[in-house]
Image: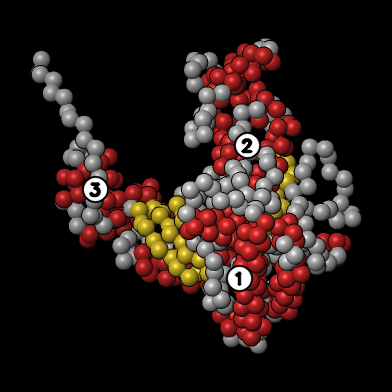
Amino acid sequence: MPAYIPKKRRIYLLNGLPPEVVAVAFAKTSRSPESFDVIAKELTEEKSAQFHEKWVVGYGHQSVAEHAVLNIAIENVSRYAVETIESNRLAAYTEKSSRYQIFTLNDFYIPEEIEHSSYKDLYTETCIYLLENYQRIQRRLEEYVKSRGLVPRKEGESDRGYEARVRAFALDRSRFLMPIAALANVGMTINARSLEHAITKMLSSPLSEVRKIGETLKDECRKVVPTLLKYASPSPYLMETQAALGKLVESLDKDRREEVGKWEGREVLSSTPSPSHTPLPSYLSDSVTLLEYDPEAEDKLVIALLYRFSHLSYQELQRVVKKMTAAEKERVIDEALRRLKDFDTPLRELEYIGYTFDCLMDYGAYFDLKRHRMCTQTPQEPTIVHGFVLPPLVEEAGLKEDFLESIRRAETAYERISSSFPQEAKYLVLNAHRRRMLWHMNLREVHHVVRLRSKPQGHFTYRKVVQEIYRLVSHVHPIIARYLQVNLEDLSVRPP
């Protein structure tokens, strides 16, 4: 019998190689017994390109492209465009924060359609006024917060640290007046397979700004992954389908607008039903509606939790669970979830349970919550028809009329420009304006969203959204909700 010679475990980084070469080095391990670093030494960029042409492009083995990872810096794009940039599930993003940075008067984008139209002056003057008033209200809120001691100084806290906390607290309110034309910087980490799809979406966008970002992104990234992005192009399917669906809904939206009338000047912290709105069932919130859930979710969760540790079929376990008492089922769920700490991720079996919510929130809250991508989100287009949010602190500080003047100016310019440029007028929508989003997520993601976004450090309007999600889940699935980590404090006026 030959002697057994154990192989030494190796874990190392493949550094300093072009992304396409790394992708081939990993791909070849399925057919080659050599180590990754040995395979990589034999590769050139030319050989890697030939490999990708044959296997990725020619035979459709696109998973290979997932090993080519790029870190991309995107600067001075509108927050409206950021929506499309960040709409990819398999990517990581970090962006300029409107909660911690003060935007300047030059920090806004002018769509080229408006740039070359008679509306240029109206659009530019409106954006400058909005950012001037945003800065003015920011300064006055900081003064008010200090004078009233709303942000108490911590023991031993430096002047710099205290000033930063006051500024952030005031910014959380003044940022409602920023238009989505405001410029942002975004850092993106993404693999080549997802990037190709991302660029395709950008090139198919109705926004010229987004199309140009897609073109530049393709040109820059092809310098390092020339083959994997070679065929990224506008998608007739996306463009034609979006246009067709948009046309179908035009008459529906027109009828709805005539029914509810104009929303101008309506400020709220949660949605206000129109006069024709039917009364909401007791388990529905005014800002979040629970559309779909499984009445048997708790039984199904018990089955899923037991399945991994059993050798019975799902149907057999289903019969077992049907015979269990309520206390026995609760014990299974308790064993699975009671040990969860703040940074623990719940078991994957929670993904078998799903919920669908219709959410109405301010644009600023949406911009934060859209970062949750392990779910399905369908936002409606930015609009002014759902009214806007007036932060309580703004009114308390005597700044309501200044705030409302920004709303009036933005909405007036929006109405005038939208008659000729309906798509481009949306750049004048403010963070304060409310927007609808359809949100489907599984129970595992509910755990993550509720725990993270209800924390005292979170923005007070998105905290309200996730607090409502928690309450709705609690109503229909009280045993499941018992293990959701949530903070239900109202921190809309005072800091955490």
Residue 265's x, y, as percent?
80, 66
Q: CA distance from mark 2 to mark 1?
A: 33 Å
Which label number is shown at residue 382?
none
Query: What scheme was used to colour the molecule?
Result: secondary structure
Q: CA distance from mark 2 to mark 3?
A: 41 Å
Residue 386's x, y, as percent?
76, 60
- The reply to whether residue 305 is visible in this rendering is no
Q: Residue at (63%, 25%) from the top-left corner?
A: 300
The amino acid type, in three-letter code, at marker 2 is Val
- Asked whether the residues under the numbered discs 3 and 1 touch, taking CB atoms below 8 Å apart as contact, a structural biologist would say no
Q: Answer above or below: position of 96 versus 10.
A: below
- The numbered mark, 2 or 1, whose residue comes first in the sequence reads 1
Q: Which quadrant would the N terminus be assigned to in this image?
A: top left
Q: Circle 1 is placed at which residue position?
A: 135
Q: Circle 2 is placed at which residue position?
A: 486
- Left or right? Give the position of 390 relative to 195: right
- The numbered mark, 2 or 3, whose residue comes first in the sequence reads 3
Q: Nearer the viewer, residue 322 or 442?
A: 442
Q: Nearer the viewer, residue 409 or 138?
A: 138
Secondary structure under the numbered disc 3 in the rendered image: loop
Residue 326's x, y, as percent?
69, 15
Secondary structure under the numbered disc 1 in the rendered image: helix
Q: Residue at (43%, 65%) from the top-left corner?
A: 74
Q: Nearer the viewer, residue 356 or 199?
A: 356
The amino acid type, in three-letter code, at marker 1 is Gln
Q: Circle 3 is placed at which residue position?
A: 14
Secondary structure under the numbered disc 2 in the rendered image: loop
Residue 452's x, y, as percent?
56, 42
